[in-house]
Image: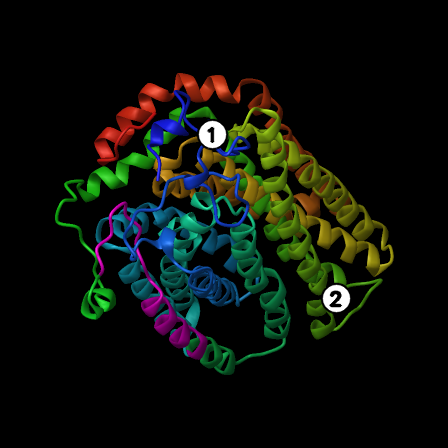
Amino acid sequence: MVHPNDYMTDVPGTVYLVDASQALSNATDAGPQEIVLIPQPSSSPADPLNWPRIKKLWSLLLISFYACVFSFGGKQLGCQLDVNLRRHRRFFNIIWIPTAMKIGRKVVYILSLLILLGGSVWGGFYTGTGQYYIMLAIQGIGTAAYQAVIQLTGVLILLFIFTFDDTMFPRYRFTYLMGSHTVQPKSSEDHRHQDNDTPTEKAESKSNGEDSALSTIGSHRIGEDIPIRSYRQKISLIHYFADDETTWFQYFRRPFYLFAFPNIVIAGIQFAFGCTAGIVSFNTISEIMTDAPYNWSAGTTGLIFLAALVGNFIGMGIGALSDWVVIVLARRNKGYKEPEMRVWACIFPFIFGAVGYFTYGWAATNGDHWIAIAVALCCLIAQQVSITSMATAYAMECFDGVSGELVVVLAICSSLINFAISYSVQPFIDATNYGWAFTCFGILVVLSVLMGLPILLWGKSWRYKCKARYEKFLAESGHSVEG
């Protein structure tokens, strides 16, 4: 184990990652021997950094399954009004996140699951418009947690940042999007032809119940020196640290402090427009495929989202590729890694975004062969998975001490941007056509990816200028300032 000064620098995010000289051989990974582990694992067997790989993957599986079930449950009622109303849910993360950081993630997982479960059961019995809106509002509060709490879960941050394995976050996004855009649209199509949702609600209730048990057993929290906990401590609903002097209000206001960091703001914009693909495709695919010239049935229309499954795999592969790019460039940079090295891989979501949006819109307008729409859908989801993974990775690598607050910033950016887009999709199409509407959205998405150019040019200087503000943030949060 080596001192942080051996691999940290005076610029936040710039670290010594590739030890080609083997001078720090006792600090490198047991796999690729030249990759320096940042941070260094402690001697405690309870430290998640010392977990066996099978335990890490199991924890990732639990988180991903939770995300998949919640994504399906939160969007199963697929009409346009539902999508717009539930777009409010991300704003409630401002409440969920500080609560999770103060008393632990486990209780937030369970509370959010119970809220969604109650709303889902009510969804089978509500009567009248008033109850319908109240039911959606309650479900929105419950589903808000999975939008961000999962991403700040210590295990996930450990897997895809601390062990420098960027394939982990795309794997999580993959299962999340499976529930959102592969399983869910099929059920939404069937819902259009059903008057009674009770069987669907019962199925979701069963999945939520199973997920509750998994998230309870698999919940953990990361620390520098973690004592071995008893079984009673592990199953406790609340994990409160006696030495945590940070108040709930301080946790609440910290994310807003990060809007003064340009690297994080740009990553948030890229993340937000990356999420746009799922919104615009979900809002329109049913109308396109069930109308002329396709005239597909509801069930067949749902099957076209198998193309989204392929796009998920492609996006996951791009996440792994960006990791490889960083290592290659770090070797050429005398072993030092810059977060901006990852931005070079943005050429792929740029291409997928341009091809996907333009092809999807104009193929639907001209009534082209359904394969064109399927290919475009594949490109849209590949762009979504890859850019959201890389934007999150970049922001966390720039300022790794703000991971919890960072996901709130990402959620706020996504809410503000996609709230407007979700309301404008159908009016835009009605006023023009699919081609021009998706051309406009495609231009916005492509421009957001091109924001990686100023990151390449000035990203490191921005990080250096934000160093004092970052150290002040760490001091308030109780983290040590290293480097």
Quadrant assignment, res 229: bottom left
Q: Nearer the viewer, residue 32 or 432?
A: 32
1 vs 2, front mark? 1
**Vertical order, 202 against 168 (above or below):** below
Q: Which mark is residue 16?
A: 1
* x 53%, y 40%: residue: 271
* Residue to which mark 2 is pinned: 290
In magenta, the rendered stretch is 206-228
Residue 128 image point, x, y percent? 42, 71
Q: Position of residue 230 (x, y in %)?
A: 19, 66
Residue 133: in magenta span: no
Disc 2 is placed on an element classified as helix
Can residue 432 be spotted in the picture? no
Q: Measure how far apart labels 1 and 2 are at the Cα level.
A: 55 Å
Q: Are marks 1 and 2 in contact (CB under 8 Å)?
A: no
In this view, 3 is above or below 382: above
Report x, y in % for residue 52.
42, 60
Q: Nearer the viewer, residue 281 or 128?
A: 281
Q: Quadrant of the N terminus?
A: top left
Magenta-span inclusion, residue 224: yes
Q: In this rendering, does residue 200 appear at all?
A: yes
Three-letter amino acid code of the residue under disc 1: Tyr
Q: Mark 1 falls on what kind of element?
A: strand
Q: Is residue 42 left or right of residue 205?
A: left
Q: Quadrant of the C terminus?
A: top left
Q: Residue at x 41, y 43 (%)?
A: 407
Say whether residue 45 is left or right of residue 464.
left
Q: Position of residue 341 (x, y in %)?
A: 58, 30
Amino acid type, mark 2: Thr
